[in-house]
Amino acid sequence: MDAISPVIDGTGIDGRSNARGRTALCQKLDHFDCVDENGNSVEVIAWRYMLETMTERGLRRYPGARYWTLADGGAVRLLDATLFEVDATGMVLIRREIADADDPD
């Protein structure tokens, strides 16, 4: 399990506990290199929303939806297991391991 940090995304979820003792967080799952349409290397980070809540039996974590970003925080959409699309530009990214495996040399 990688870093877990408060969610700060402009939606009012900011990692603080609410009246019910719940805290919204996001967990860094993975990061990997991709290649864009111009051959430039781009880092993509996989995240998961998490909800922490205190119960009678102690702290519980509930995993939520996964999402992807560029290293600079830009939104990325998953197209399939090896392809991503940058939301702002529409540029397609290919996961580096897959792109290297298709290279004939």
Image (spheres, rainbow, N blue to C red):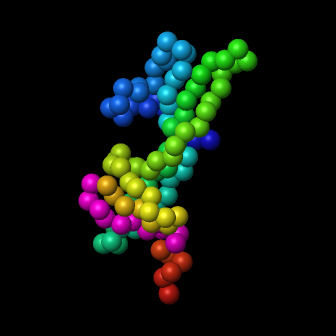
Q: Nearer the viewer, residue 32 or 67?
A: 67
The quarter of the displayed image where residue 35 is located: bottom left
Q: Residue at 62%, 30% (x, y): give it.
A: 61
Residue 91 within the magenta-colored segment of the rendering: yes
> In x, y percent, where is residue 42?
38, 60
Residue at the spot 58% in from the left edge and 41% down from the top edge: 2
Position of 49 compared to 60: left or right? Answer: left
The spot of residue 16 in percent (x, y) is 46, 20
Residue 27 in picture, x, y percent from top left: 53, 39
* Residue at figure coordinates x 48%, y 82% from the top left: 103
Question: Is residue 14 rendered to the left or right of residue 58?
Answer: left
Place of residue 87 in the rendered image (x, y in percent of width and height, measured from the top left):
31, 55
Q: Residue at x 55, y 39 (%)?
A: 64
39 relative to 16, above or below: below
* Residues drawn in magenta: 88-98
Total numbered labels: 0
- The answer to if 27 sits in the magenta stretch is no
